Image: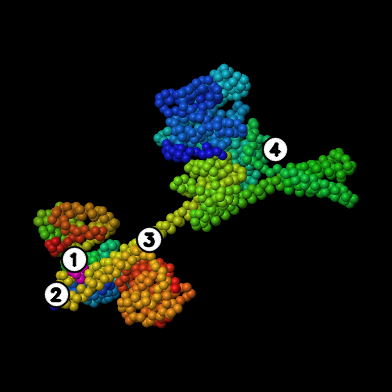
Amino acid sequence: MTDDRRPDPDALLASMQQAARGHLKIFLGAAPGVGKTWEMLVAARLKHEAGLDVVAGLIETHGRAGTIAETGTLEALHRRPVAYRGQTLEEFDLDAALARRPALLLVDELAHTNAPGLRHAKRWQDVQELLEAGINVWTTLNIQHLESLNDPVARITGVRVAETIPDHVLDLADEIELIDLPPAELRARLAEGKIYRPDVAGRALSGFFREGNLGALREMALRRVAQHVDRDVKSYMRARAIPGPWPATERVLALIGPDASAQNVVRHAARLADALDAPVIAFHVERADDDAWVQSALDLMVQLGGSVATVSAPDVITAVLDYAAAQNISHIVIGRAQPGGNRFKRLALNSFGQRLARRATAFTLHFVPIPAAAAARPPASRRPGPAIPAYAMACVLLAAVTLAGRLLQTWLPQEAMGLIFTGIIAATASRYGRNVGLATAIGAFLLWNFFFLPPVFTFTVSDPRDVVALIVFLLVGIVTGTLAGRVRLEAEAATARIEALRRISLFGQRFSRATTLDGLLQDTAEEAAAMTKAGLVMLAGASGLQPGPAMPPGTVLDDAGLAAADWALRNNIETGIGTATLPNMPWRFVPLRADNIVIGVLAARPETPPLPPLAQTLNTLADQAAMAVARVRMTMQTAQNAAREDNQKLRTALLSSLSHDLRTPLTAIRGAAETLSTAGDALPPETRADLLASIAQDTARMTKFLANIMEMARIETGEIIAKRERVRLDTVIEAAIARVKGAMYAGINIPEAAAYAMADPALLEQILVNVLDNAVKYAPEGSRLAVSAVADGSRLRLSIADEGIGIAPEDCAHVFDSFFRATRGDRVAPGTGLGLAIAKAFTEAMGGTITALSPRLDLPADGLPGTIVTIDLQAA
Amino acid sequence: MTIPIGLILVVDDEPQIHRFLTPALAAAGYESLRAETGAEALRLAAARAPDAILLDLGLPDIDGHEVLARLRTFSDIPVIILSARDREAEKIRALDAGADDYVEKPFGLGELLARIRTACRHRLRQNNEDATVDIDGLRIDPTSPRITQNGEPLSLTRREHALLLLLARNSGRVLTHRHILAAIWGAAHTEDVAYLRVYIGQLRRKLGPHHATLITTEPGIGYRLRDMAEHEGK
């Protein structure tokens, strides 16, 4: 893979940002040589001369002189060489066109199939991308390339056109110009050698270019253009709500069976729907032996602009009729018979048609004729043929039985040998299938005839008994083999379905357990890798796709892979192997869609182009992963919001506390001051003294409050750094007790074993002051405090016990939160709600913990519960 | 000591508030009662029948709103809420529940005494519903269909008239938006504060510069018609 395949990201981005879609004009012809390219060039030259920026993206001149002359002055893009099977093909350079961004780009031959290795499989997809990038495109097309006309064209001309484009591409055209040339004139031009070289022209005149063919093609082209015009008119009238004789809503159902007629059924149904201006649905009842025919027919229906429904039901006819009734179907299209099928199948199919016809009385039935030439079987179909060991095993069995029979001949009747051979045939047929069974039957017949039937050691088919034996042997082989084959296929299909379901439920469960985004992505990659060879998840970030977890670990995408993944992300389509975009990538890229937004891409590396079950399972995986990602992201968002809300609550508590704690002393100070100033002389001296004392006290209270706030702010901004030094506890306790007024002590008990701690003495003193302050505040007058320390290995526990009102058990964990004040305490004692929070922050800064326990277990149960606050520090 | 001009019940759990209010009220000629809990406040209100109550909403035992509600079941004593600015919703709730006025902590003593005087006067007037209000030439006689200004009839719409009358009957008292809207526009319009704002604006314009300031806005809460004493004192 060379680097130049990677689309230029800037060009891509620019093209994505172009909001307006380009304008598409198709120069439509009935046959090669009518002069489409020439007409396009003439029109383009006029535009160019009028000053428009016209670029010839790709022009196929076919060596025609008139066409070459017309290309003259136009700027042409260089073709892009693509190596393919030893040849160098020159292809249209899409990226160059996107980078050049002309006002009008000419791209000849819309139905062209690109060389493998280019971004798109078909040129019309290139054109679609150009249009989406906002570039106006003119292109040419012959009518026989239209998908839905593929059958009629093949019937009329006897030539099946390989390069087709879906009909909806024609609908993309804003303008269709029909380049019409009467058949006689076209043949004359051909005869003059203006189209092909004389030797080719001769053959063409008697083949494709027969006058009848040209007439039929011309009619098709004219009708198609008329339809296009008709549609324009209809949509114009509808848009302006002009009432018209709109047809009653008809709906067409294409019934898809597992045979080659399926594609014809789809095409016919699509044409019918087109003519009726009706929607069309391809309907398929799943069967065990569904093969690639079904999938390609369903794909074709999607290409032709229809929808697809698949159900699983035991009775096909009932399923069809139920669905048709539910969907208001008016027309059902089915295949008349399977080409090249055997008689039994054809009979069975005919009877299917008849049975359907008997019961489908409410619907118009269309039987699609058998195509003249059977289309090539799609390549994806792969059924296991019998292997050589199977035949060898049959031979061994036959030889063994023959030998045994010869040895036991004396008492084993020859008829019994016949039964034994029948058994062998049934066994091999059921084990290895019909073909091996048939071969065994023939072998058994020959051996039986030669070794056991008189005259022995000769081949004689004289007796009618021999003929009957041969027929019975063959029948046993065919019937057993066919039945066994079907059972095996059904079993395989069932196993595959069960496996797919198991996987789906498995990753469903797995994802529902995922709580982190990384774990989820890892799970997704592992699931994808379990289904294929490798899996990789990428999430869309601000600067494009971010590679995520890969399985096996270390798997990475090359630049081309990244570009393809990017493509899948931006366009919300699957790309890579097995799709129409970049099909020769080894990876399949599935967009992760959550609520219609593409949030990333899942890459999986299958060994072969993924068949429907695998592709569907991958899609389900991608969908479930996307939903799980959305869920996990939402959970994370919710958690963030909750954290923000908590923060908000804290701020509210802070404001409320500030408000209360500042307002009360302020009111008291102001009131006392005003009372003194207005009525000072009238007041008794002791009242005046009390008011003045009150002012001093409340001022002190506010000062303390401010100091606490500053302390807390310093902790939160990280300004306080705790020292760790060997501190003698009793000196710190003495200092703290000296600062706390109004406390009485039952005892201070610091044993020598617990005398020293690793701490910051200033911080520890403040912790003790705050805890003691709090204890005094919530304890009745006259109650006593006890301070003690215990050593416990390398730790040291310092306890302060009070005989106060205690703390509700559920609040014990919260008393150290900022602004937490037990509700009953709120008005009982003045406080800042910060003292214990500061104690906690300081303790933690020293590597310790602080806890509260209430009620005290060592106090009498009938008194106040009391509280013990324990500070755990490192011993020294 | 002279005979007290009134008995005031002060309900607050902060001792410092009582510490200065008791001498301040005494100096202004009032006798005061002190209650630190809601239960005590209700007991004293029932037993002593004070002339006005100063009520702090944050009480340790019963919520202040509950105290007010219980008080209103047996008494229409004027209640002045001592509240904080950040508790707007609480103030409105208390006013709607029957409180007469509020002061914000930290309050000035002069302001508090003025509110107490207004509340006491208002209580006297309640017994004489149809008393004519005359403020500096603005004469509002509830029995007359006309409101006159310096003898000239004011040209008011029916709603404007009703609004001014309502404010006058409750002069000195804060009326919440909800109260006014329910009284004049009906119960369905209690949230339509924008109507009220428009009518108050029109009313102020029609009253002219001299009387416009009679209607004071209590931000976020409601309106109040200042009574004569306040108007003259300004």
> Is A161 left or right of A241, judged from the image as shown?
right
> Is B15 left or right of A154, judged from the image as shown?
left
Q: What is the distance, in whole Å, between disc 1 and disc 2 at their CAs? A: 20 Å
Q: What is the distance, in whole Å, between disc 2 and disc 3 at their CAs? A: 51 Å
Instruction: Name the residue that disc number 3 marks.
Output: A647
Check whether the beta carbons of the residues at disc 4 and disc 1 lie within 8 A of each other.
no
- Where residue B36 appears, as percent x and y from the top left, is 27, 74
Chain name for mark 1: B
Q: Is residue B60 above or below residue A209?
A: below
Element type at mark 2? helix
- Which stretch is magenta? A670-674
Q: Nearer the viewer, residue B189 or A145?
A: A145
Chain name for mark 4: A
- Where residue A867 appears, as percent x and y from the top left, is 39, 76
Element type at mark 3? helix
> Is A721 left or right of A348, judged from the image as shown?
left
Could you tell me the amino acid type at mark 1?
A: Glu
| Structural crowding at the residue carrying mark 2, measured as other residues with C-alpha within 10 Å and reported as few (<14), some (14–19) or many (≥20) | few
Q: Residue at x 30, y 67 (%)?
A: A707
- Where residue B95 appears, as percent x and y from the top left, is 25, 64
| Structural crowding at the residue carrying mark 4, measured as other residues with C-alpha within 10 Å and reported as few (<14), some (14–19) or many (≥20) | few
Element type at mark 4? loop
Could you tell me the amino acid type at mark 2?
A: Ala
Instruction: Name the residue that disc number 2 marks.
Output: A682
Instruction: Name the residue that disc number 4 marks.
Output: A342
Quadrant in which the C terminus of chain B appears: bottom left
For marks 4 and 3, the one nearer the N-term is 4
Question: In the picture, residue A869 is in which quadrant?
Answer: bottom left
| Structural crowding at the residue carrying mark 3, measured as other residues with C-alpha within 10 Å and reported as few (<14), some (14–19) or many (≥20) | few
Q: Does residue A673 belong to the magenta stretch?
A: yes
Badge nearest the viewer, 4 or 2: 2
Instruction: Name the residue that disc number 1 marks.
Output: B111
